Image (cartoon, grey):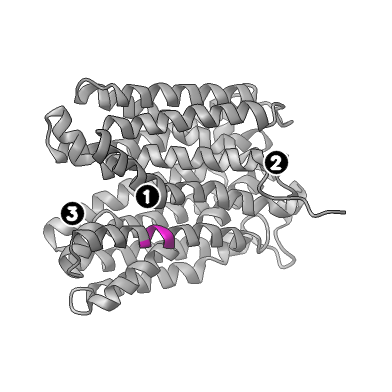
Amino acid sequence: MAKQRFFTLPVITLVGLSFMLGMSEFVVVGILPDIATGLGVSEVTVGNLVAMFAFVYAPCTPLGSALSARFPRFATHLGLMGVFLAGNLLCAFASDYAVLVVARILIAMVSGTIVSISMTYAPDVARPEHRTRFIAWVFSGFSIASVVGVPVGTTVANNLGWRWAFHLVNILTVLFMALMVISVPRHSPEQLRIGFLPQFRLFLDRRIQLGVAAVVCGAAATYVVYTYLTPIMRDDLGFDENMVSLGLVVYGLACLWGNLTSGRLAARGTGVEPLTHVRPIYVAHAAVLCSLALAGTLPVYGAAALIALGCLMYLQNSPSQILYMDVAAASHPGSTNLAASLNSMAFNIGIAVGSAVGGLVNDHLGLTWLGPVGAVFALLAALAVTALRPFVPAGGDAAASAAR
């Protein structure tokens, strides 16, 4: 029997959706000065859109995902894409900053739910042995957006104006919506139908609580530093403007490697087991963050440490997603859509916490202390996954086995 291809049109389409969502989310960073000039506001004011996006994204993702479970999957997915398109059209034609704020809130409200629904197609578009690979590639769409999409969007903005960066996203949105209609399965998966509020009993499960805590702390650990990546490269490592741009691309490639490698880590068992194997990675993460304090005196080492940080920051993604989806399938079968949203929710909470803490540390202690403070969060993540180990039976994760 011939080996079935992994990159079928439905898989490419769903990964492409993540790429497009990531480009829409991240492109603001690349064209921030252009937006500020075009709308007559300060760069700091436009920069607030980034934190605002994360604060809206985090709570709306689980709420939207739980609500989406009550409706046909494909129609809901396509409808949310329509809302996303409307938000980006509003960005492209925004007459002032207030309109842009409304547009970004609209996009943030639906983006996480779109990703979580994409995750639920795994059994329909990929063979069982490719499940973790599919999840890793859906997450990797965001890394590809940071490496390819954002620089392309910035180039388009520099040559045609910042509004055309959003027009490019709009064109991609229409393209991928058409591919969805052509290729993505229409049927909804069979699952237990329960009310909206009962789905949130999932949060009472100790395994879910510890998994979410690990991702929040793991993301916060990185974003204490990542928020100030450009100043670190410029002030501590002595990079000029061109070198900073190159450094961001190299960092993005490291993140892409981490996302894809996380799929292989997720294949090491089922249920809670894969995330418990990430414990030494969190410890290594903490060590790398601590060592960033040396970046100012050892610039070459500092550059290598930043690349290592990029490789490490997304390794938790697929193992945590497997935990949420397997535990939900085994113990909370009516909450699978909600479970699929938890990684996005937790990661964005971590972004918000890490960015806020990083701002305080930078203001009061300086760039040198960002890494050591981030290391504290990484060690907290290691403690969270250590607390998960009693839930892994000697013969493997029984709950996940039952789910399969």
| Mark 1 vs 2: CB contact within 8 A | no
Picture quarter containing residue 75?
Answer: top right
Sequence-first disc among 3 and 1: 1
Q: Nearer the viewer, mark 1 or mark 2?
A: 2
Q: Nearer the viewer, mark 2 or mark 3?
A: 2
- The residue under label 2 is which amino acid type? Val
- The residue under label 1 is which amino acid type? Gly
Badge number at residue 375: none
Sequence-first disc among 1 and 2: 2
| Separation of marks 1 and 2 at Cα, in angstroms | 30 Å
- Queried whether the magenta region covers residue 224, the answer comes back as no
- Queried whether the magenta region covers residue 251, the answer comes back as yes
- The residue under label 3 is which amino acid type? Leu
Sequence-first disc among 2 and 3: 2
User: Is 206 displayed left or right of 125 in the figure?
Assistant: left
SS class, disc 3: helix
Which span of residues is magenta-colored? 250-254
| Separation of marks 3 and 1 at Cα, in angstroms | 15 Å
Q: Position of residue 30 (x, y in %)?
A: 27, 45
**Location of mark 3 (residue):** 360
**Location of mark 2 (residue):** 125
Badge number at residue 350: 1
